[in-house]
């Protein structure tokens, strides 16, 4: 059985690989990983909240 930590490590490497392939900065990839890490720790965080965190400050800080 795969542990949560192992799953998240695999997820992180996939995010980094896809980010590189699609011209996404390392900082943005790490931000995505951080947000999903927070979501995994918080059982009450739903997809709407994840989306909101992902789009925060991506519009130039407005």
Image (cartoon, rainbow, N blue to C red):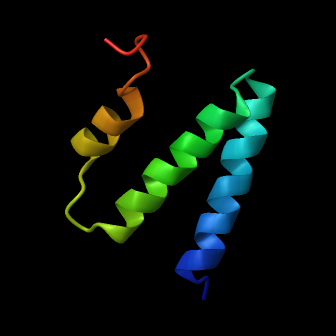
Which residue is rendered at x = 46% and y = 53% of the image? 36
| Left or right: 51 in relation to 15 | left
The relative height of residue 18 versus residue 21 in the rendered view (above or below) is below
Residue furthest left as drawn: 44
Which of 56 and 46 lies nearest the eye of the viewer?
56
The relative height of residue 5 versus residue 29 in the rendered view (above or below) is below
Position in image of residue 52 (x %, y %)? 29, 34
| Left or right: 28 in relation to 19 | left
Position in image of residue 29 (x %, y %)? 63, 38
| Left or right: 36 in relation to 26 | left
Position in image of residue 61 (x %, y %)? 38, 16
Give residue 55's quadrant in the image. Answer: top left
Quadrant for the N terminus, please: bottom right
Which residue is rendered at x = 33% and y = 44% of the image? 50
**How many badges with numbers are in the image?**
0
| Left or right: 34 in relation to 15 | left
The relative height of residue 2 versus residue 56 in the rendered view (above or below) is below
Which residue is rendered at x = 44% and y = 49% of the image? 35
Position in image of residue 13 (x %, y %)? 74, 54
The relative height of residue 12 versus residue 58 in the rendered view (above or below) is below
Residue furthest bottom as drawn: 1
Give residue 2's quadrant in the image. Answer: bottom right
Quadrant for the C terminus, please: top left
């Amino acid at each position: 059985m795969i542990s949560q930590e192992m799953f998240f490590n695999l997820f992180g490497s996939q995010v980094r690989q896809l980010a590189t392939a699609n011209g996404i900065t390392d900082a943005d990839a790490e931000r995505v990983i951080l947000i999903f890490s927070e979501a995994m720790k918080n059982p009450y965080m739903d997809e709407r909240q994840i989306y909101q965190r992902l789009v925060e400050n991506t519009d130039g800080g407005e």
